[in-house]
Image (spheres, helix red, strand yellow):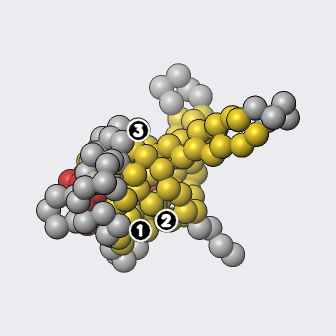
């Protein structure tokens, strides 16, 4: 079986980093991907899809430090859906891309310059191989 997702898009906001109760870093951010196509009427159209991305441990720390709103990234990982009971008693679901690799594209501001701190455009950062984190430990 295979669960693999690869996207290239732009961050919609600055990433948010937190720590679980056991001290594991977790950083979340949203990435917009767009596709262009011609509609049945022949008019050009654009469709945007938003992905919620979750990174863990050292990858989370690096993403929190170097990613900013508007930056273009390549993200590779697996899709995971989690559920919880909201305060209104309704069951809620969220599908997230659990990142195993993040590649910084463009500059720190989403443009063409080099990123800070030694992370150049096109540099890939992989996830730690410490195993999965229990979703119940998520601080959000």
Residue underneath mark 1: 101
The residue carrying pointer 1 sits among few (fewer than 14), some (14 to 19) or many (20 or more) residues within 10 Å by Cα, namely some
> On the picture, is 99 further left or further right than 115?
right
Cβ atoms under marks 3 and 2 closer than 8 Å: no
Point out residue 115 in the picture as x, y percentages from the top left corner.
Answer: 22, 58
Point out residue 52 in the picture as x, y percentages from the top left corner.
Answer: 48, 46
Hey, which quadrant is residue 70 in on the image?
top left
Hey, which quadrant is residue 34 in on the image?
top right
Total tally of numbered discs in the picture: 3
Residue at (31, 49) in percent of width and height? 111
Residue underneath mark 2: 76
Q: Residue most toward the top?
A: 88
Is residue 134 among what the camera can see? no
Hey, which quadrant is residue 3 in on the image?
bottom right
Q: Secondary structure at mark 2?
A: strand
Q: Quadrant of the N terminus?
A: bottom right
Residue at (65, 43) in percent of width and height? 36
Mark 3 or mark 2: which comes first in sequence?
A: 3
Along the viewing direction, whichever of 82 and 129 lies nearer the viewer: 129
Residue underneath mark 3: 12
Mark 2 and mark 1: span between their CA atoms? 5 Å
Along the viewing direction, whichever of 26 and 37 lies nearer the viewer: 37
Residue at (59, 39) in percent of width and height? 48
> On the picture, is 9 further left or further right than 137?
right
Q: Secondary structure at mark 1?
A: strand
Mark 1 and mark 3: span between their CA atoms? 19 Å
Point out residue 14 in the picture as x, y percentages from the top left corner.
Answer: 30, 41
Establish if 1 lies above or below 73: below
Mark 1 or mark 3: which comes first in sequence?
A: 3
Point out residue 114 in the picture as x, y percentages from the top left corner.
Answer: 23, 60
């Amino acid at each position: 079986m295979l669960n693999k997702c690869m996207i290239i898009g732009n961050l919609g906001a600055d990433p948010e980093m937190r720590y679980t109760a056991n001290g594991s870093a977790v950083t979340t951010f949203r990435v917009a991907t767009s596709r262009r196509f011609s509609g049945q009427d022949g008019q050009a159209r654009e469709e945007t899809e938003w992905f919620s991305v979750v990174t863990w441990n050292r990858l989370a720390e690096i993403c929190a430090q170097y990613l900013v709103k508007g930056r273009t990234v390549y993200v590779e990982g697996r899709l995971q859906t989690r559920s919880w009971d909201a305060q209104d008693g309704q069951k809620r679901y969220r599908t997230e891309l659990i990142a195993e690799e993040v590649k910084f594209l463009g500059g720190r501001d989403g443009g063409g310059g080099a990123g800070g701190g030694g992370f150049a455009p096109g540099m890939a950062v992989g996830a730690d191989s410490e195993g999965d984190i229990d979703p119940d430990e998520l601080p959000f």
